[in-house]
Amino acid sequence: MLAQHSTSARFARLLLTGAAGGLGRELRPRLKAYCDVLRVSDMDELGAAAAGEELYRVALQDKTGMLALLQGVEAVVHLGGVSTEQPWEPILQANIVGVYHLYEAARVHGVRRIVFASSNHVTGFYRQDEVLGTDALPRPDSLYGVSKAFGENLARFYFDRYGIETVALRIGSSFPEPRDRRMLATWLSYNDLERLVVASLTAPVVGYSVIYGMSDNATTWWDNTKARHIGYRPQDSSDVFRTAVEARQPRIDLDDPAAIYQGGAFVRTGPFE
């Protein structure tokens, strides 16, 4: 069931990149309610265009293609790129070169706001016994996390230099339900994901802001107090799944780095040859 965030704001043309990915497939039908035209892009199969949709197959590292993709767009929800730890070259092309092309195209075409899908893996080497504010300095747990830290810094530069507003979403774990005890802290429901993205698009003034993407979980490592100006109020919680999750994982191995650090298994992935 869609969340249908309460807002009177509506966009003429909204761009969703990474529309064929896991979160992109969830947001695609939801975001159409907030715009006249939803432009969706990916390199993977997007299926047929629904009413009010425009489909583009564009690689993020394609400068010319990205210039065309951003033309006539009012705001962007950027989910595109590599979303897991991988060898450096695909991360470089999609998450470094690609995000630069996105912001340059936004500058050229006068796009005023971008919702950037960052990641909790930007701060994955903080410990699970720490609580971080939105001003916590990056401690990436992976090359993927490094690339998202780059994206956050680039977004801040484009706001300071060119006035393009960005909300960087340090997304936790967005799945139908938490898969393990770590996700009791990091879980973000799909309905709360919609609320988060729409709040980030429609808040009157965001400048450059960071916010953690999580539901209203009892256990959490992140504090969004300094992001309350965005107006995101989660309504779901991982606690309804706690009993089942703890039954599946009754013990935690405190010698495992994945149980010590917030990034979980990302802290011990790779290196890749």
Image (cartoon, helix red, strand yellow):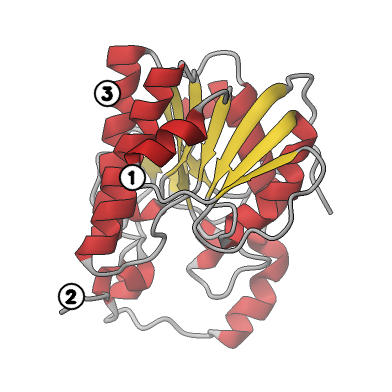
Mark 2: amino acid: Pro
Residue 164 visible in the current orientation = yes
Tell me the amino acid under the disc marked 3.
Phe
Question: Which numbered dot is residue 234?
Answer: none
- Please tell me the numbered disc located at residue 157: 3
> Between 104 and 231, which is closer to the camera in this rendering?
104
Location of residue 122 in the rendering, given as x and y in whole percent from the top left corner: 31, 50
Choose mark 1 or mark 3, whichever is in front.
1
Query: Label 3 to label 2, Cα distance in Å?
Result: 30 Å
Residue type, numbered disc 1: Gly
Mark 3 vs mark 2: which is more N-terminal? Answer: 3
Residue 147 on image: x %, y %: 27, 50
* Residue 32 vertical placement versus 71 (above, below): below
* Residue 126 appears in view: no
Q: Is residue 200 left or right of residue 123?
A: right
* Image coords of residue 220 (percent x, y): 50, 53
Q: Could you tell me how far apart the alpha carbons at marks 1 and 3 are, in whole angstroms? A: 16 Å
Left of 122 or right of it: where is 72? right
Dot 2 lies on which element? loop
User: Which label was assigned to residue 98?
Assistant: 1
Q: Is residue 63 above or below residue 163?
A: below
Q: Identify which residue is drawn at 29% across, 69% down.
A: 86
Sequence-wise, the earlier of marks 1 and 3 is 1
Q: Residue at x 35, y 19 (%)?
A: 159
Question: Are circles 1 and 3 on residues that touch, CB within 8 Å?
Answer: no
Q: Which residue is mark 2?
A: 271
